[in-house]
Image (spheres, coloured by chain):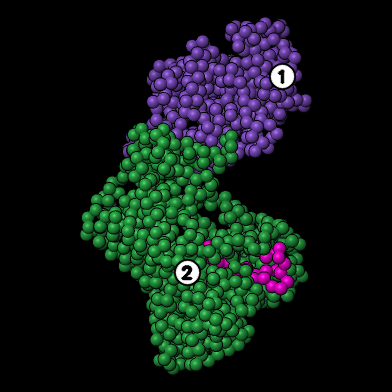
Chain colours: A green, B purple
Amino acid sequence: MNEIWANEAVRSAVLISSKPGSFIAGADLNMLEACKTAQEVTQLSQDGQKMLEKIEHSPKPVVAAISGSCLGGGLEVAIACHYRVATKDKKTVLGTPEVLLGLLPGAGGTQRLPKMVGLPAAFDMMLTGRNIRADRAKKMGLVDQLVEPLGPGLKTPEARTIEYLEEVAISFARGLANKTVSAKRSRGFMQRLTDYAMALPFVRQQVYKTVESKVQKQTKGLYPAPLKIIEVVKTGLDQGNDAGYLIEAQSFGQLAVTKESKALMGLYHGQVHCKKNKFGTPQKEVKTLAVLGAGLMGAGIAQVSVDKGIKTILKDTTQKGLDRGQQQVYKGLNSKVKKKSLTSFERDSILSNMLGQLDYEGFEKADMVIEAVFEDINIKHKVLKEVEAVIPAHCIFASNTSALPISQIAAASKRPEKVIGMHYFSPVDKMQLLEIITTDKTSQDTAASAVAVGLKQGKVVIVVKDGPGFYTTRCLGPMLSEVVRVLQEGVDPKKVDAISTAFGFPVGAATLIDEVGVDVATHVAEDLGKAFGPRFGGGSIDLFKLMVQRGFLGRKAGKGFYVYQEGVKNRSVNSGMDEILEKFRVPANPDVCSDEDIQMRLVTRFVNEAAMCLQEGILSSPVEGDIGAVFGLGFPPCLGGPFRFADSFGARQLVDKLRKYEAVYGSQFTPCQLLLDHANSPGKKFHQ
Amino acid sequence: MLSSALRNLPVSSAWAAGAFARSFSCSSQFQASVQPKTKKTLGKTGVKNVVVVEGVRIPFLQSGTSYADLMPHDLARAALQGLLTRTNVPKDVVDYIVYGTVIQEVKTSNVAREAALGAGFSDKTPAHTVTMACISSNQAMTTGVGMIAAGQCDVVVAGGTMLTLNRAKSLGQKLSLISKIRPDYFTPELPAVAEFSTSETMGHSADRLAAAFGISRLEQDEYALRSHTLAKKAQDEGLLQDVVPFKVPGKDTVTKDNGIRPSSMEQMGKLKPAFVKPYGTVTAANSSFLTDGASAILIMSEEKALAMGYKPKAYLRDFVYVSQDPKDQLLLGPTYATPKVLEKAGLSLSDIDVFEFHEAFAGQILANLKAMDSDWFAQNYMGRKSKVGAPPLDKFNTWGGSLSLGHPFGATGCRLVITAAHRLKKEGGQYGLVAACAAGGQVMSLRAPCNCLIPLVTLQDFSLWGTKIIPKLSMENCVWR
């Protein structure tokens, strides 16, 4: 940059990335993580601020030419420039995702963004960290001009598009230097009105207050970054730039060393880790996928496959079931059309790749079959045999089950090396996790293929060993059992939900049971109880059974712990449960029944079971354990997962808590050997 | 160019007698003829030769001018009557009528039949309407060629019609329009037609295409100016013999195309981009404009034409329709179709004497020329070993094109074919190639969108009768919209 300012012949400049697919995708996280103290991070932030201030005050206009992701620090660079030109394609996204890492935009972003897009939009961007597509960014005033991506010409579309972007950016840079182009944007009437309102201090105060209370409500005060962002923006607007930049750098430093930020960054790294296929490239790419069972899961799997260009056969046994499933896929895609992330034409052409059918026609061309039929070992065996009679030799058979051991399912197979578990989470199109389960007999290539499909479906993939409940269901089991015990001790479901969400779970524990389905939970609890014995005890399984008997199956039946009515937002507690809970009432021991104790009882059982999975080799690494718990089960993201939590809370303290509850409840709280080892050697951590 | 064309044609006496008897060709045409070349005929064994006897069009007018109060079948009727007058073909000889149109007017959805009845054709002659965006009349012609080649018919009239701005006729309709008026109703009437599959307008696509091939605004303006200049010259020299006058009810007789307006580079340079604002390169001046018009062409099997004493103007030999990605290659049809049709006919680009390409946008034509001249493009996108080569400009649209003459979507194909035939004769060529690109879309006031981006190419081979020479003309059609 100094060269540009020094050279008289240069009248304006264009900033463009030489790397295709990305303008600047943000600052280097490793650089942040290498810092030991808040002061060091603050220093980094101030260096960044100074550099961008130079660009902003450059006498020669600087134009940012944006193609690909322009996130975090990248966006801050872009908004420090005088003019922004962006390619209008799906890969070009702008955003400030710092909040997702427990940070804030630390290079002047908190100060420039509100001035550029207005206070409400700036808060929305910084507090949600959402990605903004180029066309939306243009409407918001975040970019000044759009360039349509080009098709093939005398070079590849990508190369020529970048070149064209550069040409257009140069023409605007020249225009700015000649004063034939003005960097001032014409703002719409509504925008001007908003700007005017935001200039009034009392309106601003009102906005701060509203945003703050919203943030409080959503984060339960567990995430410091959003509150800091509000404070920093406020300081800048009320007390001027200097104060704003100063507090931005200081807050950035403080946030970077919080345990929440470390946990979120750990999740970020874990996610990157789980987006790689450690089994390598499969011999044969899956081009045709068959899904058995058009229920919620089956249709969900079909949807995330077909919209990635995989030819998908959706098979059910009844026309009614099939119709429902096909409608679910249509609805899922159509909602994207409504949100404008898909055109109706794209929707139709995607759907043309999905075949709904009741028979096994065309299965001879399938490269992989995923079954999502009812969770019953006999049905699974029957389906497996039927399928193996019609599929080609290379075709993989994957079972979507949440608890049935894969080796048991594979026992009916003629080719167990081709059998694998693929455990999806409901709703499939929203939940990011896929848990893949390999048995001793599953071949490497089968695993590689399953992971490849999962990654193509956009999933974060963990691969675990076979066993009852695999990893995720197994960790959830003891915790839900404890929830039941807490309910039996007389804590009402609303309170249980409040306590668990206050700890950071996105869904309350009682609600979670309703969501999963009481019948499913009963089923799983019985299976796991048989496999693991008293460790999975605690709450009474008979309570579940009585609920099933009464038809309180959870949300799907309209009644569970709560009553669910279409269109009613504040659901009420199911009064029919009073009698049942009364029937199974157990005395509560006040020593272990404070809110905090209840939280710890739930979480320690979860963490202890997770550690046991690692100890037994079900899990291959703590990273996958953390990712599975957070993305599949909603373990509080601010804690970073069970293993990250064990590290930050301290294995010693964790074991102490377990011992305390063990004294009251017995072996369900006995800490596993791995936790004990960690507790006994203080320097030992799951995450180094 | 003329020097090579002015050669004497030995005409066999039988032929000449027939032709004169029909008073079908004017004497000037007759002088310009082709020296026998030793090129092979493109006739195919076992397939009937199909010939163009005559083709006409009413003057092409900018939308909203003299034809504004008419309906599409009125224009088609005028073209058909013009064809009847020119050829004196007995009405009952016509076996079939096919018309192309892009947006169907609700009351005359089979516009071919309504026009044929109104023009006085026999009510025993069946007629149907085809649509294929900008190559609708190409589709009409090739449908006729297929019927003749298959032995189903001997005499087919094909054509196309387009009237882009349908006005409300009744007071009620007028009132209902008022409620729908939006400010954008008053923006310039450029062919802003959106592709159904991509929601992209044609002009936008053309701008991106020009950018993809690095074609500057200056080049586009220069090409547009060339089109207008050549069209003006052709008009002034009376070369546009396919135009038949049309007495518009309540108005004066229209005798000339009214969209030809040679301007200056300075004037054109002042225009702002029409689609990609503010930095695009496609402007109103280097795009084809919304046009009203209609065309009609008489095609026959060769033996029928000769038996009736006609002197055909050209053979229609081969044609090819191709289609590709509607987003990025919407307007690249001619590039894909040209090598295919040449291969089919066993010719190379240098064998072609006359090129008539539909000019949707100057940028689109120039992009196609560049693509045809690029080995890289041929290898990476067309699966060919090498480029086909770009047509030399001195053989290319030398009597103007859609940019200057206008482009009534449904009617352009016939104009290209008959112009190629006339040019071959005038310039003494043997083979002509016609190309146009098409896409789908709709024009302002009506709804129905139609899509398809089908470039089509027909290769016609115009032999001069009476000698062993084969006049031919090939046409390729890249339709847009």
Identify which residue is drawn at 57% across, 79% down.
A611
Nearer-the-camera pick, B48 or A584: A584
Chain letter of mark 1 equals B
Tell me, yes or no, whether the highlighted magenta stretch contains residue A420: yes
Picture quadrant where residue A676 is located: bottom right
Q: CA gap, disc 1 to disc 2?
A: 87 Å
Q: Position of residue B445 (x, y in %)?
A: 42, 36
Query: Callout 1 environment at 10 Å: few (<14), some (14 to 19), or many (20+)?
Result: some
Q: What's the residue at 34%, 52% (across, down)?
A: A112
Q: Is residue A66 above or below residue A359?
A: above
Residue A584 locus on image (x, y percent): 47, 91
Residue A492: % across, % down:
40, 84
- Which residue matches tag 1? B303
Give the residue drawn at x 50%, y 13%: B233
Asked whether A14 falls inside the magenta stretch, the response is: no
Look at label 2 and name its amino acid.
Ala
Pinpoint the chain carrying mark 2: A
Frontmost residue, A434 versus A524 = A434
Q: Nearer the viewer, mark 1 or mark 2?
A: 2
Which numbered disc covers residue B132?
none
B464, above or below A418, in the image: above
In the displayed structure, does residue B100 sit left or right of residue B375?
left
Q: Secondary structure at mark 1?
A: helix
Is residue B278 visible from the viewing direction of this image?
Answer: no
Q: Same chain for labels 1 and 2? Say yes or no.
A: no
Residue at point 46% right, 55% down?
Answer: A26
Q: Is residue B295 visible?
A: yes
Q: What x and y, as percent, mark residue A311?
A: 64, 55
Residue carrying label 2:
A263
Residue type at mark 1: give it: Glu
Report the span colored magenta: A419-447
